[in-house]
Image (cartoon, helix red, strand yellow):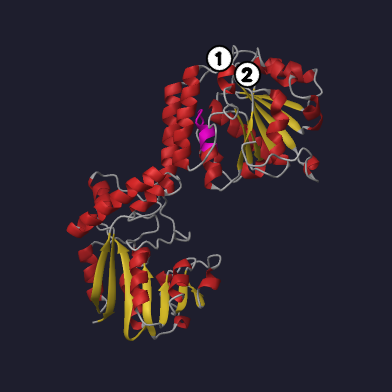
Amino acid sequence: MSESAAPDSAAPEGAAQLRVGVLVVAYNAAGTLVQTLARLPHTFARTVDHIMVCDDASSDNTYEIGLRFKNGSHLPLTVVRHENNLGYGGNQKAGYKWAIEHGLDIVVLLHGDGQYAPEHIEDIVAPLLAGEADAVFGSRMLERGGALAGGMPLYKFLGNKVLTKVQNKLAGLDLSEWHSGYRAYRVDALAQLDLPHYSDDFDFDTEIILGLADKGMRIAEVPIPTYYGDEICYVNGMKYAKDIMGDVVSYRLRRMGLGEGSTGVDTAAYELKPSAHSSHGVLLDWLERAAPGRVLDVGCSDGEFAALVRAHGHHVTGVDLVEHEGVMDRVDAFIQADLNAGLPDETGTGYDLIVAGDVLEHVIDPLALLSDLRDRLADGGEVLVSVPNFGHWYPRGRTALGLFDYDQRGPLDQGHVRFFTRKSFGRLITDAGMKVNEARTVGSPIDVLGRGGGNERLEKIAGRAAVVDRAATRAWPTLFGYQFLYRLERA
């Protein structure tokens, strides 16, 4: 295994009761299917729950040969033929749907062309039986020199290595190989993935990896031999490379909050950004400079920000639509409320400081909420506000090009229902009967470029870019300013 510890040779108690199935994907495999099935180890054949052979509308007699083998075999075998070609990914989708519906615990992907050695299927399954992984990949790259010795063409070897390195960097993983089709999964892990929306093509395997990574699933690798025989390769190498790179780039962008979002209510906890150059950093600086007092954190999320505020002696009451895990331990009091309906009476009044960080853009009537916050202040109290700048070059450019859409994060966050420029928010402040004590502008959170990749070089580049962006923000805040921040008091 590629993980630090290999599984125990003996399966844990209860592992023998796990139902293990095999999905054999086959396309024009008439000359190899029988031999592939016959090579399954006898010890595995005695314990396997079921084997499903999925013929993907082959133009040869793969299906008929599979049926003849079934009639003379003791294997628990089902052979099906798709009327229409579903594609490599589509064939797997159908097989995994079958595995989920039939209550299997583990399913192994085996290719009917014999390219991946059936003799090693027990090695693939072992980490799953031991409870050490959610997915196991057979890797031809774990043993140095094994892939080339097994007949892998040099151009494929180099392509595999280069693509895998780039994919690891973008996805923040450390796999020895992304391109093996010899795999086994816990069926309950597959059930958590959005398989119906994955590709029907050969990049399906890449999307599986990204889905597992996104869910925090454990991926293990075991070494397998490389074999290249007379099987026909149906993969268009250039298209495959283009598709998988598109998948990992899209994944990385989503991790950075720049991927496509929906227009539904965003109930996920926000990510704390304590950098001195971020909106959270500025708000914390203002709170640290204030004398300890009563603080109302409107839209407190999971309370990570509130915990830092409490550390400076403030008494913090948090308000949010969702009671996130751990929030009760990070605030002095918590009130669950829909801010679109206003603050409930139990919130009370007399707050020395009210924090509304990235909140007003999420409510239908921001004027009503800001006015409500004003009325909750003690004499001499302040409302600390941050709002995203819709005039920032990114949303401005997308709108000008006719490419407006919502993102998962940022100025076009999927949860935003109102948008502000510096002028429009200034009018809102005046209409709410308030005035500005101090205003700040922060630049883009370019540090997100380093998220999820573990790439020190990229982090250094992002750091230099952030310095340039801050300079641009000072020079032209309405174009380069990412967020506007204000200390407000009653007018």
Mark 2 residue crowding within 10 angstroms, few (<14) / some (14–19) / many (20+): many
Please name the residue shown 39% across and 86% down the image.
350
Horizontal side of 7 relative to 72 (left or right) equals left
Disc 2 marks a residue whose amino acid type is: Asp
Q: What residue sits right under mark 1 in the picture? A: 232
Asked whether residue 202 is drawn in magenta, I would say yes
Q: Are marks 1 and 2 in contact (CB under 8 Å)?
A: yes
Question: Is residue 433 placed above or below 11 in the rendered structure?
Answer: below
Question: Is residue 322 placed above or below 108 in the rendered structure?
Answer: below
Picture coordinates of residue 103 (x, y %)?
72, 41
Please name the residue shown 70% across and 35% down the image.
125
183 or 284, which is in the foreground?
284
Which segment did they paint magenta?
A: 200-208
Asked whether residue 351 is drawn in magenta, I would say no
Q: What residue sits right under mark 2 in the picture? A: 113
N-terminal of the pair, mark 1 or mark 2, is 2
Question: Is residue 448 placed above or below 122 in the rendered structure?
Answer: below
